[in-house]
Amino acid sequence: MKQRLYKFIFFRILGWKLIGMVDPKIKKCVLIVIPHTSNLDFFMGLLVRGIWDVKINFVGKKELFVFPFGYYFRSVGGAPLDRSGGKNNVDATVELFRNRDTFRLALSPEGTRKKVTELRTGFYYIALKAQVPIIPVALDYGKKEVRTGNPVYLTGNYEEDMKIILPHFKEVKGKIPERSFEV
């Protein structure tokens, strides 16, 4: 029932298209969603996830997961990030992958909704250390479509791997186009 509602909102009311999807057989991966220019991106992601009917996760600092918001964040795929004991974000996130049978982490490598000229690299090192593929997801408000690419299995050579990943985002426009990451 919820999936029909998500489809109605996404396709009929908003007029968007979905191109590709996450293969449900891939139980662990990092989905990089570019561009991230608006708070609306999170809600678009929830709609897409609901249409796919595939569990997609995100992380947040553990302090966000207390009453009353903790229940909601967990219900929509949130996972509290515990950075105690000197762990950095990458290692703490890799630990989440190791402790779960299914963990598909969606994040924005821009790290902000403001204009950036370079991506943060944490997404890459999370996927590399967790030994999971990266799946590129373009959130293109210009064409009103969400395009999901093929999984990219990393070699450990950041520059070469990014030559495979980044073309997926060429000429993609965010909700606020002037803030869009340009490939």
Image (spheres, rainbow, N blue to C red):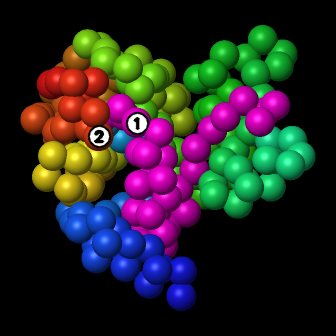
Residue placed furthest toward the front: 13
Residue 124, visible in the rendered structure: no
Residue placed furthest toward the bottom: 1
Q: Which residue is mark 1?
A: 38
Q: Is residue 71 above or below residue 142?
A: below
Which circle's residue, 1 or 2, is located before the other in the chain? 1
Q: Secondary structure at mark 2?
A: loop
Say which residue appears at 44% left-offset and 74% top-offset.
Answer: 6
Proximity of marks 1 and 2: CB atoms separated by less than 8 Å:
yes
Q: In the image shown, does 148 or 156 lie closer to the viewer?
A: 148
Image quarter hosting the C terminus: top left
Q: In the image shown, does 101 or 40 lie closer to the viewer?
A: 40
Look at label 1 and name its amino acid: Ser
The region drawn magenta spans 35-64
Q: Which mark is residue 25?
A: none
Look at label 2 and name its amino acid: Lys
Q: Is residue 108 left or right of residue 157?
A: right
Residue 157 belongs to the span the image colors magenta: no
Q: Position of residue 172 (x, y in %)?
A: 16, 39
Say which residue appears at 34% left-offset and 68% top-offset.
Answer: 10
Q: Position of residue 119 (x, y in %)?
A: 34, 19
Q: CA distance from mark 1 to mark 2?
A: 6 Å
Say which residue appears at 51% left-offset and 29% top-offset.
Answer: 126
Q: Which residue is mark 2?
A: 175
